[in-house]
């Protein structure tokens, strides 16, 4: 069995610093140095986080001159969001129906 | 009131929803067959078999668009009206079992239900996802409308 790509995404997203890095990159591409400037941790630590995000397919890095620019890759995030969204829709329908039913029960009594 | 869904880990999904109703009533709606058949099928006809005792089995069959969607499980813990835990399985994806823990809290006449579903592996989670897609694809707003219409007339 091949590894589920969504699992790597979850592991990458489990860390608050990595989520903050993604939020930073969502506002625009940046070099590792530019990303690190916004965080109170070492550039080495930021570099490790960027490696995890890249391995999960959440960011891509391109080389321009000597700078490697980091940018967000949206597809894996959408896969996770879709999983939660489908579950949400199913239960939203159930609970909207329950809501109406509870109102009806309480009007009767 | 809207539902919130969070995915704190890759095998856990947590949802929460509030209702303007006393906790005892919301708990009863989740644990008694005569209540469940009115809402769990989202407006679709629902057959409910439920032995709500620890170790008791449950089986719901949702009829949507001429097809049957059977779900089943076993009751694990009962603590009325605080909550209960049962296992959940979609029969066409048998073997992919989730544990659903429901917790009910009440404040100022509003009852909040929080359900934590735990899948034993990412594979089980994906199995459940497929069942959600299948059932979700056949959601029938017409049936829901019909049920709401019936309630209004009743």
Image (cartoon, coloured by chain):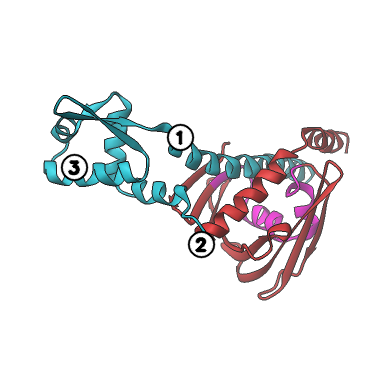
Chain colours: A cyan, B red
Chain to which mark 1 belongs: A
Give the mark, 1 or 3, whose residue is nearer the N terminus.
Answer: 3
Q: Secondary structure at mark 1?
A: helix
Q: Is residue A39 shown to the viewer in this render?
A: yes
Q: Is residue B37 magenta?
A: yes
Q: Name the residue that disc number 2 marks.
A: B121
Image spot of residue B132 (x, y percent): 65, 47
- Front-most of residues A76 and B100: A76
- Front-most of residues B83 and A45: A45
User: In the figure, A29 relative to B114: above or below?
Assistant: above
Cα distance, mark 1 to mark 3? 23 Å
Please give the name of the residue rendered at 27% of the width and 25% of the height, measured from the top-left corner: A29
Q: Name the residue that disc number 1 marks.
A: A75
Chain to which mark 2 belongs: B
Please give the name of the residue rendered at 29% of the width and 47% of the height, measured from the top-left corner: A52
User: In the figure, A32 relative to A98: above or below?
Assistant: above
Disc 1: CA contacts within 10 A as few (<14), some (14-19) or many (>=20)? few
Please give the name of the residue rendered at 56% of the width and 40% of the height, measured from the top-left corner: B3
Frontmost of labels 1 and 3 is: 1
Q: Secondary structure at mark 3?
A: helix
């Amino acid at each position: 069995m091949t590894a589920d790509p969504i699992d790597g995404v979850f592991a990458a997203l489990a860390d608050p610093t990595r989520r903050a890095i993604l939020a930073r990159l969502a506002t625009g591409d940046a070099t590792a140095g530019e990303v690190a400037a916004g965080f109170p941790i070492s550039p080495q630590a930021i570099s490790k986080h960027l490696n995890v995000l890249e391995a999960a397919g959440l960011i891509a890095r391109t080389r321009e001159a000597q700078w490697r620019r980091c940018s967000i890759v949206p597809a894996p995030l959408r896969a996770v969001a879709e999983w939660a969204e489908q579950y949400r829709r199913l239960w939203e329908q159930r609970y909207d129906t329950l809501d109406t039913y509870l109102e009806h029960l309480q009007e009767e009594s | 009131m809207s539902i919130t869904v969070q995915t704190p880990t890759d095998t856990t999904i947590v949802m929460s929803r509030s209702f303007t109703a006393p906790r005892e009533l919301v708990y009863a709606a989740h644990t008694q067959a005569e209540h469940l058949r009115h809402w769990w099928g989202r407006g679709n006809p629902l057959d409910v078999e439920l032995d709500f005792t620890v170790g008791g089995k449950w089986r719901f069959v949702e009829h949507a668009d001429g097809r049957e969607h059977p779900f089943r499980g076993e009751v694990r813990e009962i603590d009325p009206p605080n909550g209960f835990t049962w296992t959940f399985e979609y029969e066409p994806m048998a073997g992919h079992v989730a544990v659903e823990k429901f917790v009910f809290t009440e404040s100022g006449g509003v009852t909040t239900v929080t359900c934590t579903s735990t899948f034993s592996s990412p594979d089980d989670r994906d199995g459940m996802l497929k069942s959600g897609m299948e059932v979700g694809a056949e959601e029938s707003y017409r049936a829901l409308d019909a049920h709401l219409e019936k309630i209004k007339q009743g």
